[in-house]
Image: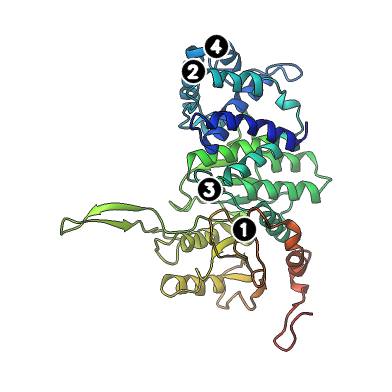
Amino acid sequence: MTADRLVQKLWNYCTVLRDDGLSYGDYVEQLTYLLFLKMAHERTEAPWSQKSVIPKGYDWPALMANEGDALEVQYRHTLEALAKEPGMLGLIFRKAQNKIQDPAKLRRLIVDLIDREQWLALDADVKGDAYEGLLEKNAQDTKGGAGQYFTPRALIRAIVECIAPKPGETIADPACGTGGFLLAAYDHIVQHHTALDRAQKKHLKLEALHGTELVDGVARLCAMNLLLHGIGPTAGETTPPAVKVDDALRADPGDRYDVILTNPPFGRKSSVRMVNADGDEERQDLTVVRDDFWVSTSNKQLAFVQHVKTLLKINGRAALVLPDNVLFEGGAGETIRRKLLHECDVHTLLRLPTGIFYAQGVKANVLFLERRPASDQPKTSKLWVYDLRTNKHFTLKTNPLKREDLDEFVACYNPANRHDRKPTWHETKAPE
């Protein structure tokens, strides 16, 4: 079965459940729980014949053995029990709830859809691409979807091709969403380095990728997305999952990485409601205060810029999506800009067109930089700008951004040797 056909099959069930008020996001989340349970059961059968990682009584056969109200009760107890487990189990089922109120439809989903496929027998590309397809459909739901966590995959692939992660490197996304950057980095290494030895393959699968996500439900989708693509530990392996649930800005984690790829959330840090001295209710922004930051700020983008600098190893490289002018405002923005240009080689800026993000009206850029050793001399000497915005018009449905729309940018960036690239514009002569 092709990935497109599998997506369509999975999505057809969603239209049935929508009649009961289930959102696209709720549906994908319930599929995640059931797919995980089914694949864990498949590993107990030939040819794998592994010991079940799911406690007895909460596994797939226990679900299949029930119908009606007893099935709904069994499913609810299963979610509650597995949420208390450590490792991958706890990550997938953390705060899990049953959103399917009709036991008959839950039974159809389990028996007619999930149980009829042998998921482990499907190629990783098929089931992984099918899940990616579901995530994209979910992002397209303007009312209740997870569009704010979904960076256009065409843009991600172009960014990763420019950064060109290599075998043996560690790659992190401190705002990983559904895992698009991590997955693209993995695919890039596999496709461009076909002669990986056993140790390199193990490192890439279990140790190279690191994601942090604040929202439990989104971290769950990311973990399942990576798992279905064959990335990270399977349930039962002791290696920590590639993604963790945490506020990335809370503190310096102490870890350092070769590559950072991220699209941090836009806006300000969360606020709290307070009652002031006059008895009036007001909101106060929560300011990020860290010893490793140049400036304390409630602006999430400015905080993430500083966080990325902290996470990078010396000579590590990063690409991050930022809203327009975030580094060109006064106050904290000016201080951070000066420090960043002094300590890092901020070498490339890609101006993005509107109409490519699921959050409407977003104007953003991609900033490429490399961290350099400490020195009295500024590390940034020249900023190369590529404008993909002028005379470009994209929409999510009728004219979506495609990977080929970024071909010229990637060619001009010259990933093989960016120091040898040539400008296509000069003040005395515009490109033909």
* Whether residue 252 is situated above or below residue 385 in the rendered picture: above
Type of residue at label 4? Asn
Name which of mark 2 and mark 1 comes first in the sequence. Answer: 2
Is disc 4 surrounded by few (<14), some (14 to 19) or many (20+) residues within 10 Å? some
Tag 4 and tag 2, C-beta contact below 8 Å: no
What number is the disc on residue 356? 1
Return the residue at label 2.
72
The secondary element bearing badge 4 is classed as: loop
Return the residue at label 4.
66
* Whether residue 416 is situated above or below residue 19 in the rendered picture: below
Is disc 3 surrounded by few (<14), some (14 to 19) or many (20+) residues within 10 Å? few
Name which of mark 4 and mark 2 comes first in the sequence. Answer: 4
Type of residue at label 2? Glu
Q: Is residue 161 visible?
A: yes
In terms of depth relative to the viewer, which is nearer, 198 or 263? 263
Return the residue at label 3.
142
Name which of mark 1 and mark 3 comes first in the sequence. Answer: 3
